[in-house]
Image: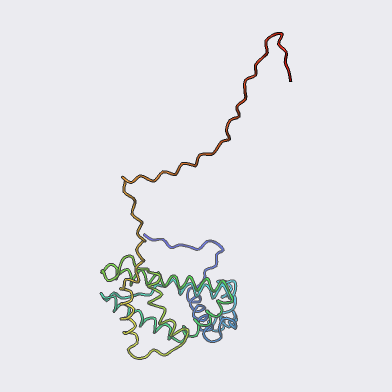
Amino acid sequence: MTQNKRAPAGAAVLRGDITSAIRAAVMQELAEVGYGRLSIEGVARRAGVGKTAVYRRWSSKLALVLDVVSDLAVRKMPLPDTGSLRDDLEILLQIINQVLKHRLASQVVPDLLAEAARNPQIAETLQQALRANQRNVADQLLGRAIARGELSPQIDTEAAVDLIIGPLYWRLAISRTRIPQGHLPRLAAVTAAALQSELMSPPPPAPRPPAPPASEAAPRPAAPPATETAPATVVPPVTTPPPGATVTA
């Protein structure tokens, strides 16, 4: 039997529908005015709530934007299993294409990237979001391809994810180039071939030099040259004259 949990006495109960409305308003404001001109007043007005409703949940504009971006980042992108690496890649590229071409993403992402160059906290949040998406792709798409035997278990997953996402992200978010008809299937085929090449596996360790045979003893160091000593001085014996003898100089 389940029991209803009650909030602690004095604790404010925040309505979930208001929180969702504020989050959606943040994305709309980011798309229309950008981070620099975004304000709590504008978010509250678009969400149809008072400013106090926003401040009950977030202490500042920065905290609000960082929380909304982080919340979007932790949502895993479902990737269907087609049974083929090439087909999985094509579906993933189609999803990325649709997401980045959406009006909100196409306006919010470039603005946040520009703001990240000036704000380390936004930069760190975006990096965490990108790493979360990379782990999602590596765990699902690459993990299944490895299990099917299409990819080497030693594949460089970080380089593989860069190769999968990088070209399309560059065209849509950076250069804003139109994607021609048939481009995504060709890109998926080229990417699959590149992932399956030997270049994506780490290089083998360098071979060690062979050890010398046990019978060959290590050469002994040469003996130091003998030092030359000066010849010893011969001292003649001293004789004592007999008593009574005359000693002459």
Q: Position of residue 157 (x, y in %)?
A: 37, 69
Residue 45 coordinates in the image, percent (x, y) = 57, 83
- The image quarter containing residue 182 is bottom left
Horizontal relation, residue 169 to residue 52: left or right: left
20 over 248 or under it: above or below: below
What is the x, y in percent for residue 202?
36, 66
Q: Nearer the viewer, residue 190 or 179?
A: 190
Residue at the spot x=42%, y=78% of the render?
Answer: 166
What sort of colour scheme is used for the picture? rainbow
Residue at far top of view: 243
Number of marks in picture: 0
Q: Position of residue 134 (x, y in %)?
A: 41, 72
Residue occupying image coordinates x 34% and y 68%: 201
Q: Is residue 82 left or right of residue 226?
A: left
Residue at image location 56% in from the left, 63% down from the top: 10
Quadrant of the drawing holding the C terminus: top right
Q: Please state, as top left, top right, bottom left or bottom right, where the N terminus lies in the image.
A: bottom left
The residue at the far right in this view is 249
* Residue in front for this viewpoint, 20 or 147: 147
- Residue sitting nearer the eye, 28 or 154: 154
